[in-house]
Image (tube, helix red, strand yellow):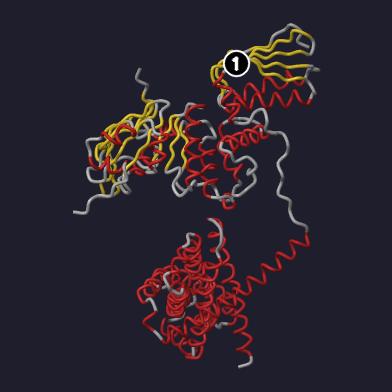
Amino acid sequence: MMKSEQLSSRFYEISEKEKGKISILLKGKIDIKNSAHILKKLTPAIKGNSLSSLVIDLGEVDYLDDFGALVLLEIKHLVAEQKAKFNVVNVKDNIKEILSLVNFESHEYFVPLKKYKPPNILVDLGETAIQHTDNIRFFISFLGSVILSFIHVCIHPKDLRINDTITYMKKTGVDALPIVALISFLLGLVMAFMSSLQLQQFGANIYVASLVSIAMVSELGPIMTAIVVAGRSGSAFAAEIGSMKISEEIDALFTMGFNPTIFLAVPRIIACIIVVPLLTLFSDVFAISGGLLVGVFMLDLSTTSYINQTIKTLTLFEVMWGMGKSFVFAAIVAWIGCLRGFQTRGGADSVGNAATSAVVSSIFLIILFDSIFAVLRSFW
Amino acid sequence: MKKQAIINVKNLVARYGDDLILKDISFDVFEGEILVVLGSSGCGKSTLLRHMIGLDRPFSGNIMIEGEDITSSDDSHFNALKKIGVLFQSSALFGSMTVAENIALPIQEYSGLSKSSIANLVRMKLCMVNLDGYENYLPSEISGGMKKRAGLARALALNPKILFLDEPTAGLDPVSSAEIDELILLINKSIGATIVIVTHALDSILNIAQRIIMLDKKTKSIIAEGDPRYLKDNSQNVSVRQFFNRKAKSRI
């Protein structure tokens, strides 16, 4: 194809003196800047020929790094594919050094690497089963350890880290108040508005107050608050404890004779079960005030009658029921957050996974326990 | 013949908030040399390094890499970054990628080579640091010394003109340390990279450093500069001699 014709540029010169015998003269600096370009140009010239031998002359190369070595290597491979002879001549000493550094002669570059083989499905199944059993075992043993720690703290109140507990109370409670208040207020507003659309048809506007207060105090208040706390604090617990776990801080605690559960989990759980019911109370109040707003401005109810109806509807039992539920939810959220934290193993991504699974598991358990409470109540 | 300076640090003042870390430091790094920045713990070695690679902005003063001021505009800062490779103290390999993917990442971005070529190049790089065969391992599956070498291969991915190594041998056994030292010398010789090392491993310093800069915690500036083998015995400064001869400070 290119008998006696020459293909050349600043970096290379190709000449074919005899049919099938190509020599390539490389020139100047072969490095990261031009290696891709040279490869692109040379590949078709070599591929298109029925080669018998190819000689690369490095006599005019001043500098060649491993990108340059890559050019030689790729050409060598192309030549080997055509079963032709390959030769590199006029190699300067400094270039020889680079080539030996990357094992140019001896290393089998084009042998495919051993790929990670996925194990067969039975092995996979077995491993997953073992993992799940381990998971459940850890679940139960952590629950036990938390209960034991609580008993320990009850007997030796001095071992409770009061300052930490107060900090977590602030973080989970006070700092969450604005968002809980806003969400509950809007929820009360929406609920009052939606129910009024139906109740108005029967002239039963006043029952909007009953509906909002009952629904919020016994159901939605505890659930909404718990979900917000799970998203804000449950995930934070998991991430904090998880990163402590992977940086060996928990091992350090252990070697100093601290019980990590008492040190890390108990303050968080206590803080949660104290502040979350209080948050729920706030959530109830804000939801009712949201309903009140709709009642007064859209349904022509007076403030007094709305509040009277609310008080008439709500019994102490109703309020305590809601608080009790949120107490349980709080314990679940904090416990799961700590559990996921302690389960963390590996690197940065596992901390993220811990936080995610803390939120997902707590929301699932909150809904599950809420249904259990509903069933219990129907048998009351 | 004096070599050309590739990095100029001029009147650098570094502060973190109210803490003055480095006070009015000036020095040059010459092309092709191995410079070691050393000093006792907490004297600002790593701070100096962070400023030189543009991670922290100086309080005042300039740092030029090949004439481009990395402290001024963002554009030239970015250009200068392409010329440097950094090995971080904890290797900073991406934990979710295999060793090969870690090294391929910058090559894919900047070289324009085909996928199979990149795979071969990565194998060459790993061959250079004696880590061939570990392409498909995750960083969590290899040892500390191997992580350092993989980090070094990643720093070398684009054959940078300047290589910054933060404590390349910290926490390694003597054999691995010696291997890394040898590798550093080899890279310096074959690729001709300028290498700036922050370390206080004495053996390494005496083995590989062509020139050292010693920082002092008290004066917050450079107290010694020159050939470590000469300074070891002949420095006028007591703390320099103490450092090189591993003498404890007298507690008076």
Measured along the vertical axis of the image, is residue A120 above or below residue A326? above
Q: Going by the image, does A268 lie left or right of B244?
A: right
Q: Quadrant of the C terminus of chain A?
A: bottom right
Q: Going by the image, does A274 lie left or right of B12?
A: right
Q: Quadrant of the N terminus of chain A?
A: top right
User: Which residue is drawn at the image coordinates 40% and 85% (left, top)?
Assistant: A156
Q: Position of residue B27 (x, y in %)?
A: 30, 31
Measured along the vertical axis of the image, is residue A32 above or below residue A335? above
How packed is label 1: few (under 14 Cα within 10 Å), some, or many (20 or more)? Answer: some
Q: Amino acid at mark 1?
A: Phe
Q: Position of residue B216 (x, y in %)?
A: 26, 43
Q: Label 1: chain? A: A
Q: Position of residue A28 (x, y in %)?
A: 56, 16
Which of A369/A299 is in front?
Answer: A369
Residue B127's image quarter? top right
Q: Which residue is mark 1?
A: A11
Disc 1 secondary structure class: loop
User: Which residue is drawn at the image coordinates 81% and 17% (left, top)?
Assistant: A50
User: Which residue is drawn at the image coordinates 47% and 81% (left, top)?
Assistant: A149
User: Which residue is drawn at the image coordinates 50% and 31% (left, top)?
Assistant: B187
